[in-house]
Amino acid sequence: MNRVVITGAGTVNPLGQDVAATMAALRAGRSAIGPLTCRDADRLSVRIGAEVRGFDAALRLGAGDAARLDRFSQFALAAAREAWGQAGLAPTPDLAAKAGVIIGSAGGGQGTAEDSYRAVFAEGRNRVPPLTVPRLMHSAAASRISQEFGLMGPVFSVASACASSNHALGLAFQMVRSGLAPVMLAGGAEAMLTFGGIKAWEGLRVLSPDGCRPFSARRNGMVMGEGAGVFILESLGHARARGAPVLAEIAGFAMGADAGDLLAPSAEGAARAMRAALADAGTAPDAVGYINAHGTGTGLNDAAEGAAILEVFGMDGPCVSATKSLHGHAIGASGAIEILACLLALNEGIIAPTAGVEAPDPAIPLDLVTGEARQARVTSCLSNAFAFGGLNAVLALRRA
Amino acid sequence: MARTVDGEVIAILARQAVLDPREVTPEMTPGDLGLDSLGLAEAIFAFEETFDITVPFNANRPGEGGFDLSSVGAIITAVKGLIAGKA
């Protein structure tokens, strides 16, 4: 069994269009939630979100990828390039034959699908652009990244709604740990802040009209975001042999399903996933210094997740923050973006805060970090993802 | 035969609750009907589509927003109020 480390990180998200800018925003507790500017926003009843503003795909990626990729793949490719550059990999033919890419996304090329439907249904046109299918397929981002770096091992996408990133990272972790692949790129990407994407969430009546306040007594829903996070996962031996930077160790992973309600989360299922991740990592609960909560700001998630954390860690458990209050809920990309908050905690001892919480919900007595960032020495942390459909995926990280 | 607002609202709630409309009485609560927040959201969507109204409802805080969901009778009154407000 190999130990697995992260040797590169990349992102495009509402807080920043690279890791450095994102870390600065997380340290400052600066929220990127604001008015939505998507097409037909005046017909939306929920008008706030966390958008990636001013992302110039042509400038960042070149004209070809700007034209041929959906926005979610553009985010993923930009993030992958940043991570790859940091890791400094120069793959041999043997490495290239084994290394792969797993990118989680809940909606794939939502914007591309929507534009083509608009053309044929609303505008009565009889043809759509030729690259509609390769742009909208969920696997488009993983495929494009494999081409970028010549990686010929396992390359695919995973979709598990709001847990997609954690499942992607967890599968890649297991592949590197088992020796199947010495290096994997993994993370998530989402670009669902389209008119139809937001309308669909509006219909569920779980979006907040005025802000994301996880674990707050006054929470009234989630706020959508978008973006990508991509990481280089590598066996510790491989990383050491080439003198690579080691950002953190992925120590454990667990996934499971509630097999219960379609939408209402289960505290028992969440607790089971956290316990299993700790067991997989060989980490005792009292060694955990930080939990990046799923923390969506909905009534049901935060109550169930809070109960699960209290069940696993007791009343004197680790500090918790929910950074969706800063970068929004990027759906399938959330877990990957939240790994950055874990890296900040492990490497700088800074806990990014939960924004918008005037008074924590007294029914959920967690050590919630609110207001501004907190200093804390953290050697182990968890990152939770609990998706609609009852799909739970928890990553356990350790300081390298 | 023209259907009344009362009858339509009860029919929608009964359909969501998988009950015979004759079993639904004005004093029953959504809980009595066996409706969870998802069932309520589906019923509210049906009210909006049937009567061309917009119902203020957030599943995170179902008791707020000014739309009285405390009983079948209260829901009928609230729907009638929104229909009257359109005029």
Image (tube, coloured by chain):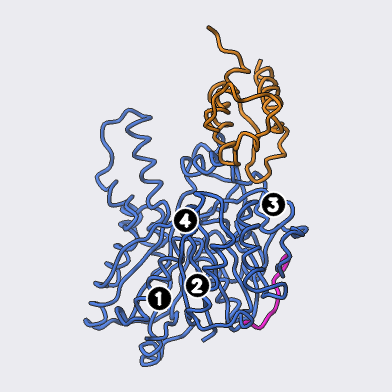
Chain colours: A blue, B orange
User: Which amino acid, by three-letter code, is at mark 2?
Assistant: Leu
**Pointer 1 residue:** A173
Magenta: main secondary structure equals loop
Question: Magenta span has A373?
Answer: yes
In-image side of A135 versus A387 (left or right): left
Precedes in sequence: disc 3 or disc 2: 3
Tag 1–tag 2 contact (CB < 8 Å): yes
The chain to which mark 2 is attached is A
In-image side of A147 versus A225 (left or right): left
The chain to which mark 4 is attached is A
Give the image location of residue A277, x and y in percent: 50, 74
Give the image location of residue A21, x and y in percent: 56, 68
User: Which amino acid, by three-letter code, is at mark 4?
Assistant: Ala
Q: Quadrant of the N terminus of chain A?
A: bottom left
Tag 3–tag 2 contact (CB < 8 Å): no
| Residue bounds of the magenta highlight | A370-378
- Observer-side mark, 4 or 2, equals 4
Q: CA distance from mark 1 to mark 2?
A: 10 Å
**Pointer 2 residue:** A395
Task: Return the residue nearer the eye: A110 or A16.
Answer: A110
The verdict on a common chain for dots 3 and 1 is: yes
Q: CA distance from mark 4 to mark 1?
A: 25 Å
Give me the disc on residue A219. Answer: 3
